[in-house]
Amino acid sequence: MEEGLLRQKLKNWLIGLGIDPVDLKIYVESLTHRSFAREINIQSRGNEQLEFLGDSVLSFIITSYLYKNYGFFSEGRLAKIRSILISRANLAHSAKNLKIDKYILLSENEEFTEGRKKESILADAMEAFIGALYIDKGINFAGQWFLDRFEDSIEDFIKNPKISDYKTYLQEIIQTDYLKLVKYNVEKSEGPDHKKVFYSIAMIDDRVIGHGSGNSKKESEQQAAKDALKSLYNVDF
Protein backbone atom coordinates (compact mmCIF):
# COMPACT_ATOMS: atom_id res chain seq x y z
CA MET A 1 0.00 0.00 0.00
CA GLU A 2 1.28 3.49 -0.88
CA GLU A 3 2.73 5.23 2.20
CA GLY A 4 0.43 8.26 2.12
CA LEU A 5 -2.65 6.06 1.85
CA LEU A 6 -1.40 3.82 4.65
CA ARG A 7 -0.86 6.80 6.97
CA GLN A 8 -4.34 8.15 6.21
CA LYS A 9 -5.89 4.75 6.84
CA LEU A 10 -4.01 4.52 10.12
CA LYS A 11 -5.10 8.03 11.16
CA ASN A 12 -8.73 7.23 10.40
CA TRP A 13 -8.46 4.07 12.51
CA LEU A 14 -6.96 5.99 15.43
CA ILE A 15 -9.66 8.66 15.26
CA GLY A 16 -12.24 5.87 15.25
CA LEU A 17 -10.65 4.69 18.51
CA GLY A 18 -11.02 8.15 20.02
CA ILE A 19 -7.39 9.16 19.45
CA ASP A 20 -6.60 12.32 17.48
CA PRO A 21 -2.86 11.74 16.94
CA VAL A 22 -0.35 14.55 17.36
CA ASP A 23 2.56 12.42 16.15
CA LEU A 24 1.34 9.78 13.74
CA LYS A 25 4.89 8.49 13.26
CA ILE A 26 5.06 7.11 16.80
CA TYR A 27 2.02 4.92 16.15
CA VAL A 28 3.57 3.65 12.91
CA GLU A 29 6.64 2.71 14.93
CA SER A 30 4.50 0.92 17.51
CA LEU A 31 3.01 -1.25 14.77
CA THR A 32 6.32 -2.03 13.03
CA HIS A 33 7.47 -5.55 13.77
CA ARG A 34 11.24 -6.06 13.79
CA SER A 35 10.95 -8.44 10.83
CA PHE A 36 9.51 -5.62 8.69
CA ALA A 37 12.21 -3.19 9.85
CA ARG A 38 14.91 -5.67 8.82
CA GLU A 39 13.20 -6.41 5.52
CA ILE A 40 13.16 -2.78 4.41
CA ASN A 41 16.64 -2.26 5.90
CA ILE A 42 15.95 0.63 8.26
CA GLN A 43 18.06 1.34 11.34
CA SER A 44 15.41 0.28 13.83
CA ARG A 45 14.47 -2.68 15.98
CA GLY A 46 10.85 -2.01 15.14
CA ASN A 47 8.50 -1.59 18.08
CA GLU A 48 10.72 -3.23 20.71
CA GLN A 49 11.59 -0.03 22.61
CA LEU A 50 7.96 1.09 22.66
CA GLU A 51 6.96 -2.39 23.80
CA PHE A 52 9.39 -2.05 26.73
CA LEU A 53 7.88 1.32 27.65
CA GLY A 54 4.28 0.22 27.13
CA ASP A 55 4.74 -2.75 29.45
CA SER A 56 5.50 -0.36 32.33
CA VAL A 57 2.76 2.11 31.37
CA LEU A 58 0.14 -0.62 31.18
CA SER A 59 1.28 -2.11 34.49
CA PHE A 60 1.01 1.34 36.09
CA ILE A 61 -2.50 1.93 34.72
CA ILE A 62 -3.80 -1.44 35.95
CA THR A 63 -1.97 -1.29 39.28
CA SER A 64 -3.38 2.19 39.97
CA TYR A 65 -6.89 1.02 39.09
CA LEU A 66 -6.65 -2.02 41.35
CA TYR A 67 -5.21 0.03 44.23
CA LYS A 68 -7.98 2.66 43.99
CA ASN A 69 -10.84 0.17 43.65
CA TYR A 70 -9.58 -2.97 45.41
CA GLY A 71 -7.01 -1.70 47.88
CA PHE A 72 -8.60 -3.92 50.53
CA PHE A 73 -7.32 -7.01 48.68
CA SER A 74 -4.01 -8.48 49.83
CA GLU A 75 -0.87 -7.52 47.94
CA GLY A 76 -0.52 -11.11 46.75
CA ARG A 77 -4.05 -11.22 45.41
CA LEU A 78 -3.63 -7.88 43.63
CA ALA A 79 -0.38 -9.07 42.07
CA LYS A 80 -2.05 -12.27 40.89
CA ILE A 81 -4.93 -10.36 39.28
CA ARG A 82 -2.53 -7.93 37.60
CA SER A 83 -0.31 -10.70 36.26
CA ILE A 84 -3.28 -12.39 34.60
CA LEU A 85 -4.66 -9.12 33.21
CA ILE A 86 -1.34 -8.29 31.53
CA SER A 87 -0.60 -11.85 30.42
CA ARG A 88 0.25 -12.46 26.77
CA ALA A 89 -3.06 -14.16 26.18
CA ASN A 90 -5.07 -11.21 27.50
CA LEU A 91 -2.94 -8.63 25.69
CA ALA A 92 -3.29 -10.53 22.42
CA HIS A 93 -7.05 -10.67 22.92
CA SER A 94 -7.14 -6.92 23.56
CA ALA A 95 -5.08 -6.30 20.43
CA LYS A 96 -7.63 -8.19 18.36
CA ASN A 97 -10.48 -6.22 19.93
CA LEU A 98 -8.80 -2.99 18.83
CA LYS A 99 -8.03 -4.50 15.39
CA ILE A 100 -4.32 -3.90 15.93
CA ASP A 101 -3.72 -7.15 14.05
CA LYS A 102 -4.98 -5.47 10.88
CA TYR A 103 -2.36 -2.71 11.04
CA ILE A 104 0.84 -4.46 12.14
CA LEU A 105 3.65 -4.12 9.59
CA LEU A 106 5.18 -7.55 9.03
CA SER A 107 7.79 -9.05 6.74
CA GLU A 108 6.68 -11.28 3.89
CA ASN A 109 7.89 -14.31 5.81
CA GLU A 110 5.87 -13.39 8.91
CA GLU A 111 2.83 -12.81 6.72
CA PHE A 112 3.34 -16.24 5.17
CA THR A 113 3.57 -17.89 8.60
CA GLU A 114 0.40 -16.10 9.81
CA GLY A 115 2.23 -13.68 12.09
CA ARG A 116 -0.93 -11.63 12.55
CA LYS A 117 -2.38 -14.51 14.52
CA LYS A 118 0.67 -15.12 16.73
CA GLU A 119 0.01 -14.39 20.38
CA SER A 120 3.52 -13.04 21.01
CA ILE A 121 3.39 -10.56 18.11
CA LEU A 122 -0.08 -9.34 19.06
CA ALA A 123 0.79 -8.95 22.76
CA ASP A 124 4.01 -7.07 21.95
CA ALA A 125 2.15 -4.78 19.54
CA MET A 126 -0.48 -4.03 22.19
CA GLU A 127 2.19 -2.99 24.68
CA ALA A 128 3.98 -0.91 22.03
CA PHE A 129 0.71 0.79 21.09
CA ILE A 130 0.11 1.80 24.72
CA GLY A 131 3.69 3.09 24.84
CA ALA A 132 3.05 5.20 21.75
CA LEU A 133 -0.22 6.50 23.20
CA TYR A 134 1.59 7.56 26.38
CA ILE A 135 4.28 9.43 24.43
CA ASP A 136 1.78 11.12 22.13
CA LYS A 137 -1.00 12.01 24.57
CA GLY A 138 0.37 11.64 28.11
CA ILE A 139 -0.39 9.32 31.00
CA ASN A 140 -3.77 10.82 31.95
CA PHE A 141 -5.16 10.41 28.46
CA ALA A 142 -3.61 6.94 28.03
CA GLY A 143 -4.98 5.72 31.35
CA GLN A 144 -8.49 7.02 30.78
CA TRP A 145 -8.55 5.79 27.19
CA PHE A 146 -7.53 2.29 28.26
CA LEU A 147 -10.05 2.10 31.09
CA ASP A 148 -12.85 3.43 28.87
CA ARG A 149 -12.37 0.36 26.70
CA PHE A 150 -11.29 -2.35 29.13
CA GLU A 151 -12.68 -1.48 32.58
CA ASP A 152 -15.68 -3.76 32.06
CA SER A 153 -13.35 -6.64 31.16
CA ILE A 154 -11.24 -6.01 34.27
CA GLU A 155 -14.32 -5.97 36.49
CA ASP A 156 -15.68 -9.09 34.82
CA PHE A 157 -12.44 -10.94 35.49
CA ILE A 158 -12.33 -9.86 39.14
CA LYS A 159 -15.92 -10.98 39.70
CA ASN A 160 -15.70 -14.11 37.54
CA PRO A 161 -12.01 -15.01 37.35
CA LYS A 162 -10.79 -17.48 34.76
CA ILE A 163 -8.29 -19.27 36.94
CA SER A 164 -6.00 -22.20 36.23
CA ASP A 165 -4.45 -22.44 39.73
CA TYR A 166 -7.38 -22.51 42.15
CA LYS A 167 -5.20 -23.45 45.15
CA THR A 168 -3.04 -20.33 44.87
CA TYR A 169 -6.02 -18.05 44.32
CA LEU A 170 -7.90 -19.56 47.28
CA GLN A 171 -4.89 -19.22 49.59
CA GLU A 172 -4.47 -15.55 48.72
CA ILE A 173 -8.11 -14.85 49.62
CA ILE A 174 -8.07 -16.98 52.77
CA GLN A 175 -4.86 -15.32 53.95
CA THR A 176 -6.58 -11.93 53.66
CA ASP A 177 -9.79 -12.96 55.43
CA TYR A 178 -8.60 -15.46 58.02
CA LEU A 179 -4.78 -15.28 58.21
CA LYS A 180 -4.86 -19.07 57.92
CA LEU A 181 -3.31 -21.68 55.67
CA VAL A 182 -5.51 -23.98 53.60
CA LYS A 183 -4.65 -27.66 54.03
CA TYR A 184 -5.60 -30.57 51.80
CA ASN A 185 -6.20 -34.22 52.66
CA VAL A 186 -6.88 -37.13 50.36
CA GLU A 187 -9.84 -38.91 51.93
CA LYS A 188 -9.85 -41.93 49.67
CA SER A 189 -9.07 -43.28 46.22
CA GLU A 190 -11.04 -45.70 44.07
CA GLY A 191 -10.51 -47.75 40.95
CA PRO A 192 -7.65 -49.63 39.30
CA ASP A 193 -4.15 -48.10 39.18
CA HIS A 194 -4.47 -47.03 35.53
CA LYS A 195 -7.79 -45.28 36.19
CA LYS A 196 -7.72 -44.29 39.85
CA VAL A 197 -9.91 -41.47 41.17
CA PHE A 198 -8.77 -39.47 44.19
CA TYR A 199 -11.11 -37.63 46.57
CA SER A 200 -9.70 -34.65 48.49
CA ILE A 201 -10.96 -32.08 50.95
CA ALA A 202 -9.77 -28.51 51.55
CA MET A 203 -9.70 -27.36 55.19
CA ILE A 204 -9.10 -24.35 57.41
CA ASP A 205 -8.08 -25.71 60.80
CA ASP A 206 -10.58 -28.58 61.25
CA ARG A 207 -13.30 -27.03 59.08
CA VAL A 208 -13.92 -28.59 55.66
CA ILE A 209 -14.46 -25.84 53.09
CA GLY A 210 -14.36 -27.79 49.82
CA HIS A 211 -14.51 -31.21 48.19
CA GLY A 212 -12.92 -32.36 44.94
CA SER A 213 -12.09 -35.40 42.89
CA GLY A 214 -9.72 -36.14 40.02
CA ASN A 215 -7.44 -38.66 38.38
CA SER A 216 -4.47 -37.44 40.46
CA LYS A 217 -3.98 -36.04 43.94
CA LYS A 218 -3.05 -32.67 42.44
CA GLU A 219 -6.19 -32.49 40.31
CA SER A 220 -8.45 -33.50 43.22
CA GLU A 221 -6.90 -30.78 45.40
CA GLN A 222 -7.41 -28.17 42.67
CA GLN A 223 -11.06 -29.20 42.41
CA ALA A 224 -11.44 -28.98 46.19
CA ALA A 225 -10.04 -25.43 46.08
CA LYS A 226 -12.43 -24.55 43.25
CA ASP A 227 -15.34 -25.90 45.27
CA ALA A 228 -14.24 -23.82 48.27
CA LEU A 229 -14.12 -20.66 46.17
CA LYS A 230 -17.66 -21.31 45.00
CA SER A 231 -19.08 -22.10 48.44
CA LEU A 232 -17.25 -19.43 50.46
CA TYR A 233 -17.08 -16.55 48.00
CA ASN A 234 -19.70 -17.34 45.39
CA VAL A 235 -17.03 -17.20 42.66
CA ASP A 236 -18.52 -18.45 39.40
CA PHE A 237 -16.33 -20.34 36.90
Image: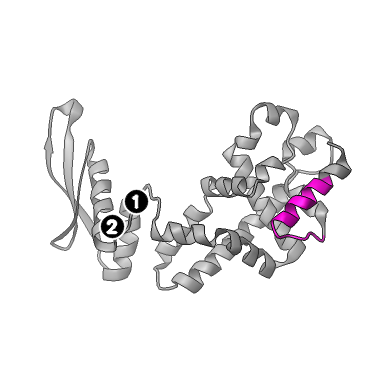
- Describe residue 70's horizontal placement relative to residue 150 as left or right: left
Residue 180 visible in rendering: yes
Q: Is residue 147 left or right of residue 224?
A: right
Q: Quadrant of residue 194?
A: top left
Q: Which residue is mark 1?
A: 237
* Occupied quadrant, residue 53: bottom right
Residue at image location 31% in from the left, 66% down from the top = 175
Q: Residue at x 73, y 60 (%)?
A: 19
Which residue position holds label 2? 229
Dot placed on the residue nearer the N-terminal end, 2 or 1? 2
Residue 80 visible in the current orientation? no
Magenta extent: 7-22
In percent of the image, x 65 and y 34: which residue is there? 115
Residue neighbourhood size for the residue with mark 1, other residues' Cα within 10 Å, grouped as few (<14), some (14–19), many (≥20) = few
Q: Position of residue 174 (x, y in %)?
A: 29, 64
| Residue at (61, 61) in percent of width and height | 146
Q: Secondary structure at mark 1?
A: loop
Q: Quadrant of the N terminus?
A: top right
Tell me the kind of residue under disc 1: Phe
Q: Nearer the viewer, residue 118 or 150?
A: 150
Q: Quadrant of residue 198?
A: top left
